[in-house]
Amino acid sequence: MIKTEGLSKTYVTKIKKGLFHKEKKKVEAVQNLNMVINKGKITGLLGINGAGKTTTIKMLSTLIEPTKGTAIIDDLDLKKDANEIKKKINMIAGGERMLYWRLTGKENLWYYGQIYNIPKDILIKRINKLLKLVGLFDDKDTPVERYSKGMKQRLQIARGLINDPTYIFMDEPTLGLDAPIARDLREYVKKLADEEEKGILLTSHYMNEVEELCDYIYVLDNGILIAEGSAKELALLVNDHKILRIEIDELSFELEKAINNICTQFSGEVKYTRREQHAEIYLTTKEDVSTSIATLLTQYNASIKKFLSEEPKLEDTIISLARREKNV
Ligand SMILES: Nc1ncnc2c1ncn2[C@@H]1O[C@H](COP(=O)(O)OP(=O)(O)OP(=O)(O)O)[C@@H](O)[C@H]1O
């Protein structure tokens, strides 16, 4: 298990003021973060741009030192045991960084294996296993410059697994990939947690990806942890209304009046749109009124074309949470 304890990072940069004067500027990128990452689970780290996600991953990967606080990784302390921790972790970033384009896929993995001092016989077996895992075995002797975007990204995953890490930090792993390739990658990520028991920390701008993959989510805003929970739990924190989207063949004024009554009763709002062939009803209420509305539609013999009870989207939730913090 990884447990961060008051993990914090303040960047100090100098900005030019006039010709000869420089002023120090402090950015509190991450403040007092307490978070848990379990083995065999995918933990999400979300936030709008500049929230502190990459900084958190860089600290956990021992690339930058925390200003305050620490993290305990199994029994090791991030600040004191960085060398031991490096063997247990790895980072997978989106994009095409960290790969050597003139080397083949296999040579890239060999190079990174050498950095970790992995014994030759183990490394050969592991490289073959990883190339098969990410579906690149047949292309192992092709230079990376001839790989497609998706192939490069799959090689990134293999590179991130070369030291057989217990914990993997994935920063936007599907960034810029086409939908089918991204879907395949999500499958790999799921497999790593479910079948290989890896503990994964994932940041992503794609909300559907986070909703689909993450067991537990932490939400950062301006470096501060503002919420945590499963996607459903987070949605419940801000979305206190339910949405019903209905389409019927014909909307009589009596039925409209009856729906209005229910709506008033449950402090809701309703919008009607009459079209040539059908009518649309968009209803938001504090409580779930789907059963009452369905009963009403049956009573009035309405011919129902669509009846959708919508779940609040995680993206709306994150934006609402961030707004709630700023009181806007
Ligand atoms: N090396 C640095 N020096 C100074 N400030 C930095 C540095 N790196 C990041 N920052 C600042 O720290 C804050 C957090 O940045 P970080 O990159 O961790 O956020 P993020 O959530 O990953 O953002 P994004 O989604 O845009 O990648 C931002 O205000 C950023 O400008």
Image: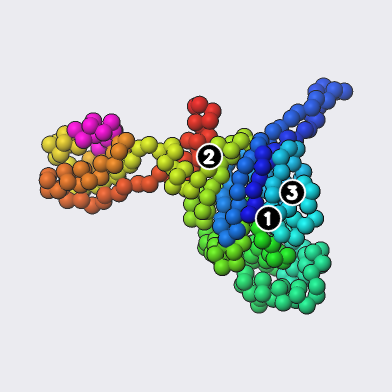
Q: How many marks?
A: 3
Residue bearing mark 3 = 78
Dot 2 alpha-carbon crowd within 10 angstroms: few under 14, some 14 to 19, many 20 or more = some
Quadrant in the rendering for residue 165 = bottom right
Residue bearing mark 1 = 74
Instruction: Identify the residue shown where x is 38% and y is 46%.
Output: 311
The front one of 158 and 22 is 158
The front one of 164 and 102 is 164
Circles 1, 2 touching at the beta carbon (< 8 Å): no
Residue bearing mark 2 = 227
Dot 3 alpha-carbon crowd within 10 angstroms: few under 14, some 14 to 19, many 20 or more = many
Report the magenta residues as a range.
260-272
Q: Is residue 264 above or below residue 213?
A: above
Instruction: Identify the residue shown where x is 62% and y is 69%.
Output: 134
Q: Position of residue 39 (x, y in %)?
A: 60, 58
Q: Mark 2: which amino acid?
A: Ala
Per the model, the C-alpha gap separating discs 3 and 2 is: 24 Å
Please identify, in this view, whether the residue under mark 3 or under mark 1 is nearer the observer: 1
Please identify, in this view, whether the residue under mark 1 or under mark 2 is nearer the observer: 1
Q: Mark 1: which amino acid?
A: Asp
Instruction: Identify the residue shown where x is 44% and y is 47%.
Output: 232
Which image quadrant: the N terminus? Answer: bottom right
Disc on the earlier residue, 1 or 2: 1
Indicate if the residue with disc 2 has its beta carbon within 8 Å of ligand 1. no
Numbered disc 1: secondary structure: loop
Q: Is residue 149 above or below residue 5?
A: below
Query: Does the image show residue 176?
Result: no
Per the model, the C-alpha gap separating discs 1 and 2 is: 24 Å
Please identify, in this view, whether the residue under mark 3 or under mark 2 is nearer the observer: 3
* Residue 271 lies in the magenta stretch: yes
Q: Is residue 197 above or below residue 70?
A: below
